[in-house]
Image (cartoon, rainbow, N blue to C red):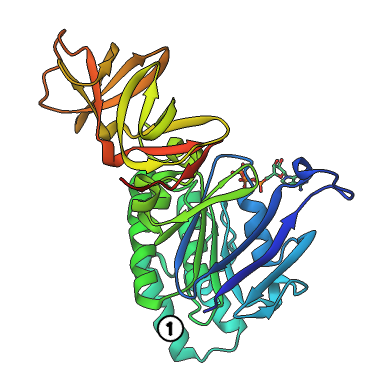
Amino acid sequence: MARITLDHLAHSYLARPKGEDDYALKEMNHEWGDGEAYALLGSSGCGKTTLLNIISGLLRPSAGRVLFDGRDVTDQPTTARNIAQVFQFPVVYDTMTVRENLAFPLKNRGADAAYVAKRVQAIASVIGMEAALDRKARGLTADAKQKISLGRGMVREDVNALLFDEPLTVIDPHMKWELRTQLKSLHREFGHTMIYVTHDQTEALTFADKVVVMYDGRVVQIGTPEELFETPAHTFVGYFIGSPGMNILPAKIEGDRALINGSSVALGRHYGPLAGDVTIGVRPEYARLSATEGLPVRIARVEDVGRHKIVRAEFFGNDINIIAREDEAIGADMTRVAFDASRINVYADDWRVEGEAA
Ligand SMILES: Nc1ncnc2c1ncn2[C@@H]1O[C@H](COP(=O)(O)OP(=O)(O)OP(=O)(O)O)[C@@H](O)[C@H]1O
């Protein structure tokens, strides 16, 4: 397994990039820990696949270096990097049996027969295909073929890293959950460095120790699911993670208070003067309706989603979402919203500002 270093890494698909906008990946410097499971999360076109292809060696970056355990691999082809990859669509040999497909990466490297047999059996059990081991891959469903691809990706124990590019797209929803859980337990067992590309936050949050959130060619935050929830480093993270995402409300900050349309809201921390476009971020979980407390709000509708209710409302001309308990009565007298001061984040030009203890 390897520690992966991205050193002044940047990529443009243009031959002569002029400004920053011409870069699919803006310059980044990161070190990803040996044996950790990372999810690369972001919306379509933010650069996830570009970054994964640079790490795997399918793409040479236009600037910077990639290092595995401190060793420069930037100019090495994929085959020399000793990594396993699983793509969105199945890569299997139709004329081979499931067993032969799973054994292929091991036999290719000259592993001995007893080890291959044992390992194939273990992986077949992880992907739930023990009963189909002697069937030809031809004729299997796309779902089953993708499970074989996942198995082939995981069969070798000696790889530097395991890279997944949206591998569960063709898998049915129930199996998705099961495979994700299996991947996670496999990671615990073998400690592979894993990088998993997805645009699905549930997939990212259940799979990864650390989630790398990308936006517009940049890594905007690397954090645990809890950090992304509690202290999003960028408003995009606040908005993208959570269901619904964080409320972003224009405000003026004065010390330990935010002014919204002239009304004052307590903050958990103290802030110095801020430049740029200033907003506060409040998760719907940390906003509550009240008859007496807080600022005026107008409820537009209430959605009962089973576990809780999502209240869609208007707040000084902005949309705001509030999560209410399932058993909470929402009467006509609920005309105010109050926020949990210690959970409010402050942003200047979309980046989180770290306040001082009040
Ligand atoms: N081969 C290419 N040539 C030119 N531009 C490309 C190429 N591949 C990707 N891009 C551009 O680079 C940017 C990043 O694309 P990339 O595929 O890395 O994003 P992504 O986050 O993986 O998106 P998706 O989830 O849709 O796969 C996009 O603007 C895309 O249009």
**Against 158, is 256 above or below?**
above
- Find numbered disc 1 in the image and state the secondary structure of the residue it sits on: helix
Q: Disc 1 marks which amino acid? A: Ala
The location of residue 344, given as percent across then percent down, is 34, 37
Reading the image, the residue beneath label 1 is 117
Tag count in the figure?
1
Residue sitting at 18 percent across and 20 percent down?
293
Q: In the displayed image of the protein, which residue is found farthest to the top?
A: 332
Residue 253 is left or right of residue 63, and the answer is: left
The residue lying toward the viewer, choosing from 60 and 142, is: 60
The image quarter in which residue 326 lies: top left
The location of residue 114, given as percent across then percent down, is 44, 90
**Against 176, is 251 above or below?**
above
Is residue 86 visible in this depiction of the protein? yes
The location of residue 282, given as percent across then percent down, is 35, 33
Is residue 304 visible in this depiction of the protein? no
**Against 238, is 205 above or below?**
below
Quarter of the picture for ligand 1? top right
The residue lying toward the viewer, choosing from 35 and 151, is: 35
The image quarter in which residue 134 lies: bottom left
Pick the quarter of the image with the C terminus: top left
Residue 7 is left or right of residue 160, and the answer is: right
Residue sitting at 58 percent across and 32 percent down?
276
The location of residue 38, given as percent across then percent down, is 47, 61
Residue sitting at 58 percent across and 56 percent down?
87
The residue lying toward the viewer, choosing from 122 and 65, is: 65
Q: Residues within 10 Å of mark 1 (few under 14, many from 20)?
A: some
Residue sitting at 56 percent across and 48 percent down?
214
